[in-house]
Image (tube, rainbow, N blue to C red):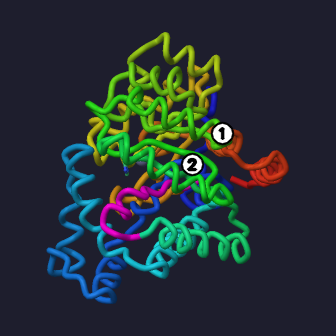
Amino acid sequence: MTDTPASPSDAALHSLPKAELHLHIEGTLEPDLAFELAARNGIRLPYETVDDLRRQYDFSDLQSFLDLYYETVDVLRTEDDFAELTRRYLGTAAGQGLRHVELFFDPQAHTTRGIALETVLDGITAALDEAERDLGVTSGIILSFLRDRPVEEAEATLTAGLQRTDRIIAVGLDSAEVGYPPRLFEQVFARAREAGLHAVAHAGEEGPPAYVVEALDLLKVERVDHGIRSAENAALVERLARERIPLTICPLSNLRLRTVSDLAAHPLRRLDAAGVRVTINSDDPAYFGGYVGDNFIAVRDALGMSEEDARRYARNSVAASFASEKRKTELLAEIDAWIA
Ligand code: ADE
Ligand code: ZN
């Protein structure tokens, strides 16, 4: 009889050193902080209590989530608000093994309600600098365009963002996917890449495999965010594996937004077995029931995960990051030294 390899415990998966590459900072707004900030800024949320707000977290699809996400983001007004939001995320995620993060922010969710890009960025970077100093967590910031808003607005957002390439390392594309194909943003992405920024995009979350192909061919992305519907197209899976294109997969998000019916049916392991560089991430952890380490645990419970699988997912997250070669070497050594 052959023994099946033991699975790492919850504590082991939380201590596994890892990078998170798919995290919307606005999606880390926990209900208690939302109420705290609302009180501080004299805003009335349309919910009586923290529990009332939490009861709204029963989503039918991506749009039903985005409606709440854009509504609650209104409590974020000052640089300190963005710093506190980011600080709390980093504290929680560092407790789950986070060593490096490349986080998205959605400038248009703020500039369209009169909050300056500088306010948002200065708050986020203040907390990121603290985390590097106090927790040893390194980071990068990804400016993400809202694909369901006009392309001209994305152009203007990029122009503003190009003033801050001291901190912004990449551009991304998010929000409602179906009906807003990557090709709409071909020129915006070309300009960002010419300015030296990396490129990633959400594709194949709710949208078809053809959107993943467009993101690769037209936006020339280096990673695909979600990308799970790629699994429906064998030629695309083979291409992702051959070209070593990482997917930033978010299992609990996919479950809560019903892009998969059940975690046991999630394509993560099939993609991994086909040689695709898959990574495990939390997307919007305050809304989807878990931070990055919790997503590792959910995958272990639904799909199985040996110690070697866990190490491979963590190594993939480092290899797929935009960290310096020196930092990648350090992080890979930490993963090698991990005791499951
Ligand atoms: N914005 C925040 N989370 C998102 C997701 N999962 N998909 C698209 N846009 C988002
Ligand atoms: Zn996302």
Depicted 329 relative to depicted 80: above or below: above
The one of 294 and 112 positioned closer to us in this rendering? 112
Q: Which residue is mark 1?
A: 320
SS for tag 1?
Answer: loop
Quadrant of the image occupied by residue 273: top right
Is residue 75 located in the magenta-colored stretch of the structure?
Answer: no
**Residue 8 location, x and y as percent?**
60, 50
Q: Which residue is mark 2?
A: 21
Depicted 159 relative to depicted 117: above or below: above
- Residue 12 is at least partly visible in this image: no
Neighbourhood count class around disc 1 (C-alpha, 10 Å): few under 14, some 14–19, many 20 upward: many
The one of 84 and 60 positioned closer to us in this rendering? 84
Residue at 34 percent of width and 23 percent of height:
208
Which quadrant of the figure contains the N terminus?
Answer: top right
Disc 2 to disc 1: CB gap under 8 Å: yes
Instruction: Give the residues in magenta.
Output: 101-115
The one of 294 and 178 positioned closer to us in this rendering? 178
Is residue 106 located in the magenta-colored stretch of the structure?
Answer: yes
Residue at 61 percent of width and 59 percent of height:
164
